[in-house]
Each structure stands twice: as structure tokens, then as C-alpha cells.
Image (cartoon, helix red, strand yellow):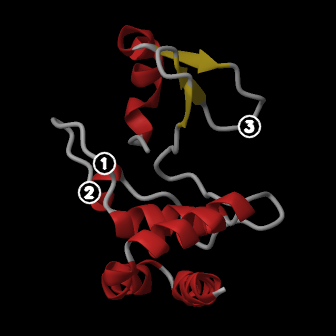
Amino acid sequence: MLPADRIEEFLRVASVSGFRVIAAEQGRWPKTIHSGMDTKVDILPEGERPGSKTNPAPTSIPHPSTMGADESTLKYIELPALIELKIAAGRGRDEADVIELMRLNIDQSTKIRQHLTAAHPNYVVKFDQLLERTKTEESD
């Protein structure tokens, strides 16, 4: 996730940190791949709407500082914010990620739910469904 006004700068200097920019289709968000680790990294532009054309998220991507980022320090996104972005994306693989994350962090479900309540009510409904699946799949 990057602030809207920093994306072009990041793409220009990405190679210095071992990233290679992957050519994106028209209208798609930029992607990079880290050469040393062969790991794809999606760029989530602030202000854009996640989801798909047929099922857009009800919110846009917030500024990284509201999701736990710090301009001067490399930090991981906070778990509640990551869950928000995963739910907003609405893809099956993101839902599977949420289930796995909750399996490992069930003790944070109240904190995550509070965060999602502030983000959008639809996110809480989806989270509750995924949390129920987490509990159901654990007992299988």
C-alpha cells in the first residue's frame, strides 16, 4: 500500500531494492517482483477501490498512515488493517487468507472486529462469516 503521490517515485527506484516492475494491463494496479526472493508484490494505491469491476468494495484504500504505516520506518501493516484489505478485495484467495490468519490469531478477533466496524458494516458481516468458517473448519 502506497500513498497516491508516492507510487511513481517507488516504481522509479524499486530496482535499487531488488524489485522489478511487472508490466501492468491498462487500468490495472502496478505489480513488482522481488528478484532475490521471487516474491510478487502488489501495489495498493491509496484512494483506489479494491474488489472487481462487478463487485467493487464499498470503501477505497485509505492512506497507509491510517493502516499502521510509518513514513520513515519499514513496518508491517497491522493485522486489523490487513484483514480489512483482504475482505475489501473480495477474492476467494483473500478469504482463505483471512481464515488462516484468524486460525493463528483468534485472540485478536475482538480488536479486528472493532477496526472493521469503523471501516464499514459490510466488512464486519463478512468477517463474522469467515470467523465462523474458521471455527467450523478447525473442528473438522
Where's residue 41, x and y in %?
53, 34
Where's residue 47, x and y in %?
50, 53
Residue at 46%, 74% in the rendered image: 102
| Residue holding disc 3 | 27
Residue found at the far front of this picture: 140
Element under disc 2? loop
Q: Identity of the amino acid at label 2?
A: Gly
- Above or below, comparing residue 1 to residue 57 in the picture: above
Element under disc 1? loop
Would you call the spot at circle 1 few (<14 residues within 10 Å), some (14-19), or many (20 or more)? few
Q: Is residue 32 left or right of residue 82?
A: right
Would you call the spot at circle 3 few (<14 residues within 10 Å), some (14-19), or many (20 or more)? few
Quick check: marks 1 and 2 in contact, CB under 8 Å? yes
CA distance separating discs 3 and 1: 27 Å
| Residue holding disc 1 | 76
| Residue holding disc 2 | 68
Q: Identity of the amino acid at label 3?
A: Gly
Dividing the picture into quarters, in which one does residue 87 lie?
Answer: bottom right
Would you call the spot at circle 2 few (<14 residues within 10 Å), some (14-19), or many (20 or more)? some
